[in-house]
């Protein structure tokens, strides 16, 4: 049995500044139990909701509850316990990093964990972030909207609950830390649901009222927040249709599901705001009932397992282990297991992520939470033989002081260039200087940004230093300034025939992150694709910059790549390829294909009237929902050609 929490002047709904001096208490054992229930809730919601992921898109699911675990139960039988999925495995990975490196690991350490453990089963913003990491970019560039084309998608709100679970009652700390971690994969309003969830999770250790929790989440969002407006919209729908969640869902979908100015891809169903709105509806219509909240989260559809997992984890904190229905904790029957899910968390999704006991995973999480409490003004007090955490609610998170990394930065002579290399909280008061090397003529250091219009070509190595208080950090960058892009003067664009309706002229419009040309395949046969240019007069060429645009889930990439040029007789010859920077992934899988990442192909200089990149097109078999067919094709956003 839990010891009841002692709440001392706990003003959750007041502005954070007004509560800075306030303390809250929770029994150490009660905190540990609630952390355990949070893990159980997330596991239940993830496995239950997984059977309904993307099942209900155009219409909500049926109002025939309970739905049951569905097809996911087969994997439960197979592993004889719970299994990992992307709604829980990244948080487990973060748990390991905090144990190894301390309670506030850096972006660099977390990125190293991503690159080691995450090698497949990764989608949209998470995938784009991972491929940016592998190309040499570090967070928060990996989530920044200038680099990650999926910055507005669902990803961070399903992988960051652990930062709030380990910060009970510490709303400011929990929301700031969660926002910081969310920027590994997302940006702008794409991180707002994460912040909202973090506030609810941190508050849920002391607050049981669902509507108050929702308001606490909204209070943590910035002024003018897009998601705060969506939350208020969901509250209005709930009041308008208090007994008809399906009608509310239809109106919600009409407003938030579809293509918007920021989202024109094929992944509209995983939009952060859309799925966040679904989570709020699930909480409202669930009315605090665990099973009903779980079913409505599943029936609302879209990326349903995310909402099911996160909201079930929240209710786990609110009610503890005994508040989760027994049939959900023992889906194969109470007589088969002694403990919920056989106390087994089996890794089926990440490289070298160790299997673990669920109770042990929760115990270790709670231990880290205790360390965070004590490191941020809290203490342990004893009363009548019971140990309590006394928590400083005003505690705040300050991001580790570090600079971003990036591969060689590409620029063109006479073309505007800008690169923000420091994203610290105190960016406006820090000091900035070049301590080694020099910037190209025309570029200047404007606080935390390199900007200007380069007036000279070449390769420039520079070391920058940022000072903050008594600390300073240095980071090396290389800027490569090219001269004229010869693609602009080409008389013809070269490409194999394709049934696509896309305009191939976009590959030389100078906008490398605006649009993608898909060289569609007319049949399922393997094929070779090429892109290049021809000129009326011979050109000297030494570098080609290929930007792949946004590969699709089933194709849109090369599995091999060479550079060819025409000799004086018109015969195509293979150029000597000296380097490809950053390196490219040529496996015929979708998992590690970078999006909108410039690839510099340096060759032994040639003089020619035509040049092209050429290689085998990739493609995998689509799932049944998408027709099951296979097509081999490539994608490209930009192809630039330089003499220097």
Image (tube, rainbow, N blue to C red):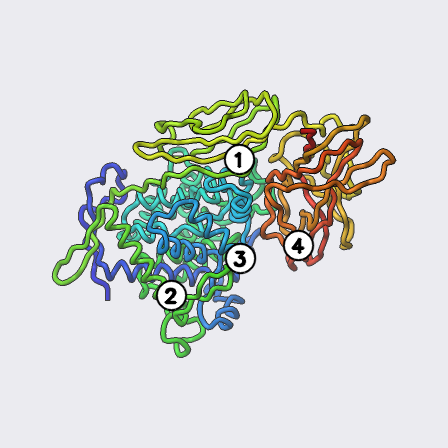
* Label at residue 146: 1
Residue at 34%, 44% in the rendered image = 215
Q: Locate the N terminus and report the quarter of the image it occupies.
A: bottom left
Count the marks.
4
- SS class, disc 1: loop
User: Which residue does the numbered mark 2 point to in the structure image?
Assistant: 358
The answer to which image quadrant residue 365 occupies is bottom left
State which mark lies toward you, 1 or 4: 4
Judge from the rendering whether residue 95 lies leftward or rightward of residue 143; answer left or right. Answer: left
- Is the residue under label 2 in contact with that under label 3 (CB below 8 Å)? no
Q: Position of residue 314 (x, y in %)?
A: 36, 55
Residue 479 shows in this picture: yes
Asked whether, in this view, residue 233 is left or right of residue 412, the answer is left
Real-space Cα separation, disc 4 to disc 3, in angstroms: 26 Å
Name the residue beneath numbered marker 3. 53
Q: Residue furthest left?
A: 384
Q: Is residue 222 above or below residue 353?
A: above
Which is nearer the eye, 599 or 39? Answer: 599
Q: Earlier in the sequence, mark 4 or mark 3?
A: 3
Classify 10 Å Cα crowding around label 4: few (below 14), some (14-19), many (20 and above).
some
Mark 2 neighbour density, 10 Å: few (under 14) some (14–19) many (20 or more): many
Q: Which residue is mark 4?
A: 588
Q: Which of the two discs, 4 and 2, labels the residue nearer the N terminus?
A: 2
Secondary structure of the residue carrying numbered label 3: loop
Horizontal and vertical percent position of residue 394: 25, 42
Frontmost residue, 507 versus 27 = 507
Which residue is farthest bottom?
Answer: 335
Of the residues tagged 3 and 1, which is closer to the observer? 1
């Amino acid at each position: 049995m839990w010891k009841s929490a002692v709440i001392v002047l706990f003003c959750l709904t007041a502005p954070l500044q007004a509560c800075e001096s306030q303390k809250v208490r929770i029994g150490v054992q009660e905190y540990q139990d609630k952390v355990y229930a949070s893990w159980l809730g997330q596991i239940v919601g993830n496995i239950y909701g997984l059977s309904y992921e993307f099942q209900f898109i155009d219409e909500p699911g049926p109002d025939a509850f309970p739905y049951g675990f569905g097809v996911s139960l087969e994997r439960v039988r197979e592993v004889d316990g719970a299994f990992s999925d992307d709604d829980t495995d990244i948080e487990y990975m973060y748990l390991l990093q905090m144990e190894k490196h301390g309670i506030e690991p850096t972006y660099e350490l977390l990125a190293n964990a991503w690159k080691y453990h995450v090698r497949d089963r990764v989608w949209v913003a998470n995938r784009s972030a991972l491929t940016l990491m592998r190309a040499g970019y570090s967070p928060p560039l990996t989530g920044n909207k200038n680099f990650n084309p999926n910055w507005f998608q669902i990803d961070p709100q399903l992988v960051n609950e652990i930062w709030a679970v380990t910060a009970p009652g510490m709303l400011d700390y929990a929301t700031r830390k969660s926002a910081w971690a969310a920027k590994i994969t997302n940006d702008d309003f794409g991180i707002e649901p994460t912040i909202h969830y973090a506030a609810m999770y941190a508050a849920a250790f002391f607050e049981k009222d669902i509507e108050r929790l929702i308001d606490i989440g909204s209070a943590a969002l910035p002024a003018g927040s897009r998601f705060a407006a969506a939350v208020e919209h969901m509250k209005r729908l709930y009041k308008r249709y208090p007994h008809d969640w399906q009608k509310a869902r239809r109106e919600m979908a009409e407003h938030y599901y579809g293509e918007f100015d920021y989202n024109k891809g094929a992944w509209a169903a995983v939009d952060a705001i859309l799925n966040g709105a679904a989570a709020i509806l699930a909480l409202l219509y669930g009315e605090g009932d665990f099973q009903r909240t779980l079913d409505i989260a599943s029936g609302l559809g879209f990326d349903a397992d995310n909402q099911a997992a996160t909201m079930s984890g929240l209710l786990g904190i609110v009610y503890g282990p005994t508040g989760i229905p027994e049939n959900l904790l023992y889906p194969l029957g109470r007589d088969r297991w002694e403990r919920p899910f056989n106390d087994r968390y089996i890794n089926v999704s990440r490289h070298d992520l160790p299997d673990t006991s669920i109770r042990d995973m929760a115990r270790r999480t709670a231990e880290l939470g205790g360390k965070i409490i004590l490191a941020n003004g809290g203490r342990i007090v004893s009363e009548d033989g019971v140990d309590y955490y006394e928590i400083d609610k005003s505690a705040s998170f300050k991001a580790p002081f570090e600079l971003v990394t990036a591969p060689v930065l590409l620029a063109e002579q006479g073309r505007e260039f800008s690169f923000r290399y420091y994203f610290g909280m105190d960016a406006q008061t820090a000091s900035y200087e070049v301590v080694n090397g020099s910037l190209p003529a025309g570029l200047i250091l404007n606080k935390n940004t390199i900007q200007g219009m380069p007036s000279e070509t070449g390769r420039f190595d520079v070391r920058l230093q940022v000072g903050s208080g008594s600390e300073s950090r240095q980071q090396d960058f290389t800027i490569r300034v090219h001269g004229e892009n010869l693609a602009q003067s080409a008389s013809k664009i070269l490409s194999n025939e394709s049934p696509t309706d896309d305009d191939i002229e976009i590959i030389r419009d100078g906008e490398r992150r605006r649009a993608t040309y898909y060289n569609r395949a007319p049949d399922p046969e393997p094929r070779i694709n090429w892109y290049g240019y021809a000129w009326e007069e011979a050109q000297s060429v030494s570098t080609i910059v290929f930007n792949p645009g946004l590969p699709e889930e089933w194709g849109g990439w090369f599995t091999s790549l060479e550079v060819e040029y025409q000799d004086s007789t018109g015969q195509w010859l293979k150029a000597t390829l000296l380097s490809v920077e950053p390196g490219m992934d040529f496996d015929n899988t979708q998992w590690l294909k970078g999006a909108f990442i410039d690839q510099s192909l340096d060759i032994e200089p040639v003089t020619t009237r035509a040049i092209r990149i050429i290689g085998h097109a990739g493609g995998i078999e689509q799932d049944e929902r998408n027709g099951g067919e296979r097509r081999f094709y490539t994608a490209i956003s930009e192809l630039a050609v330089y003499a220097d």
